[in-house]
Image (spheres, rainbow, N blue to C red):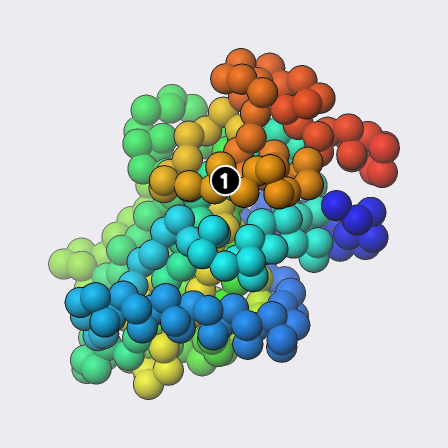
Amino acid sequence: MNPSCLQFSLTEEERKIFNETGYLIVENALSPEQIANLTAVSDRIYEQRVSEGHDSKTALFYANFIADHDSFLNLVDYEKIMPKVWDILGWNIYLYHAHMIMTPPSGKEKNDKTFGWHQDSGRVNVDMESHPRPRLSLKVAYFLSDISEPDRGNFWVVPGSHLNDNLDIPLNEQGQPEGAIPVRVKPGTAVFFDRRLWHAGSPNWSDITRKVLFYGYGYRWIRTKDDMTVQHLWDQSDPIRRQLLGATVNCNGYYSPTDEDVPLRAWLKEHQPVKA
Ligand SMILES: O=C(O)CCC(=O)C(=O)O
């Protein structure tokens, strides 16, 4: 990790926005070249899936894609984003989950049906007793397509809902919860969201395919949420990337990490001593 990444640390204003709303929009996180490259690789994966039988009118959810291409791998510790992730969660973190969602035009008439509102992490929200629920993880969504207009399969959120354990869903499943808004952003924008934020994907009523890459970071004692077959990349990765790809000396290191388990801790002590 190059210490120059620290220029992208979380500002106090960004922290306030994230803490209060449960999400944070970082514009121009990706350069036009990165967008073009990531889009080309994602398109190839999508076409391949369609050729294997995926219905080209429905969204493709494709997890465990990090090892598919270096441009995906390079975002794991991306300098413009990673400092904000560790400034929110701390150093005992890794990439526990990553997925791509390609949402093609549905070809259907717009309707008012309630979207699939949820908090992330499934049973975690049931099994853990605490209020509000613990943050535990966040996702960074890199938007590759233009969703600056509504109806383009936008990611929807209820700002400030991350501290609520429940969400009132409209009766008869018509309409969206009170306060819900579509996130409207240009290609290259990264959207951070707290796993507890009530959010939903939405149908694409436009004629532009929506393309997003989701990177989920959480504490190292959380299990992976997809197969995350990235272990073969450990040897070729620098120490911090290795940590983010889930490496550990032994299982105890997930709970009581040594410096070898968490090189990010020593790196932060050296380069960002006030926060480490
Ligand atoms: O497709 C979307 O915008 C929603 C994605 C989502 O719900 C998630 O990553 O948890």
Horizontal arrangement in the rendering, residue 136 relative to residue 59 (left or right): right
Residue 68, relative to residue 211: is it above or below?
above
For the C terminus, the quadrant is top right
Q: Is residue 58 visible to us here? A: no
- Whether residue 171 is visible to the viewer of this picture, yes or no, is yes
Q: Is 90 rendered above or below residue 23?
A: above
What is the residue that sits farthest to the left in this orientation?
Answer: 172
Question: Split into 4 quadrants, where in the image is the N terminus?
Answer: top right
Image side of residue 151 versus residue 97, left or right: left
Considering depth in this image, is 150 or 71 the residue closer to the camera? 71
Which corner quadrant of the image does residue 42 belong to? bottom left
Q: Residue at x 58, y 20 (%)?
A: 249
Which residue is at 42% across, 30% downward? 223
Answer left or right for 21 relative to 101.
right
Residue appearing at x 34%, y 56% in the figure: 62
Is the CB–ligand 1 distance for label 1 below 8 Å? no
Tell which of 204 and 64 is nearer to you: 64
Residue at image point 33% right, 83% down: 206
Residue matched to label 1: 232
Give, as a three-letter code, the residue at label 1: His
Numbered-mark total: 1
